[in-house]
Amino acid sequence: MGRKKLQLQRIENKSRCQVTFSKRRSGLIKKARELSVLCDVDLALVIFSSRGRLYEFCSADRELRTDPL
């Protein structure tokens, strides 16, 4: 049995939205890390929250990164 398809819609509850964002952010970073290891590629991920906070992931050495945004 598969999962039921859900229709995407904005989450109006602020605390629920923050929890969902945090969980999805963790999942995205985990997938980015897996992709960089499995495919032996350098990968960068930049995420901005609705509050304007910056989250980043870089699979390469910090020296290879460009200037911060």
Image (cartoon, grey):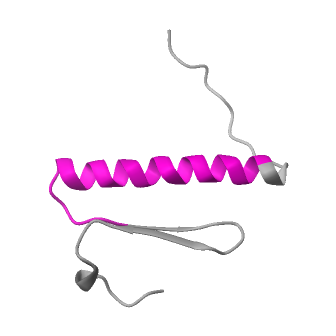
Please count the marks in the image: 0
Residue 59 lies, with reference to residue 63, above or below; the image says above
The residue at 23%/71% (across/down) is 60
Residue 3 lies, with reference to residue 16, above or below; the image says above
The residue at 27%/65% (across/down) is 59
Q: Is residue 22 magenta?
A: yes
Residue 63 figure quarter:
bottom left
Residue 9, how many percent across, how many down? 74, 43
Q: Which residue is outermost to the bottom?
A: 67
Query: In the figure, is residue 45 to the left or right of 59?
Result: right
Q: Which residue is outermost to the left?
A: 40
Viewer-proximal residue among 5 and 25: 25
Residue 33, how many percent across, how many down? 31, 54
Classified by dominant secondary structure, the portion drawn in magenta counts as: helix
Query: In the figure, is residue 10 to the left or right of 24?
Result: right
The residue at 44%/87% (across/down) is 68
Q: Which residue is outermost to the right?
A: 13
Residue 45, how many percent across, how many down? 41, 65
Residues rendered magenta in the picture: 16-44
Residue 34, how many percent across, how many down? 28, 48
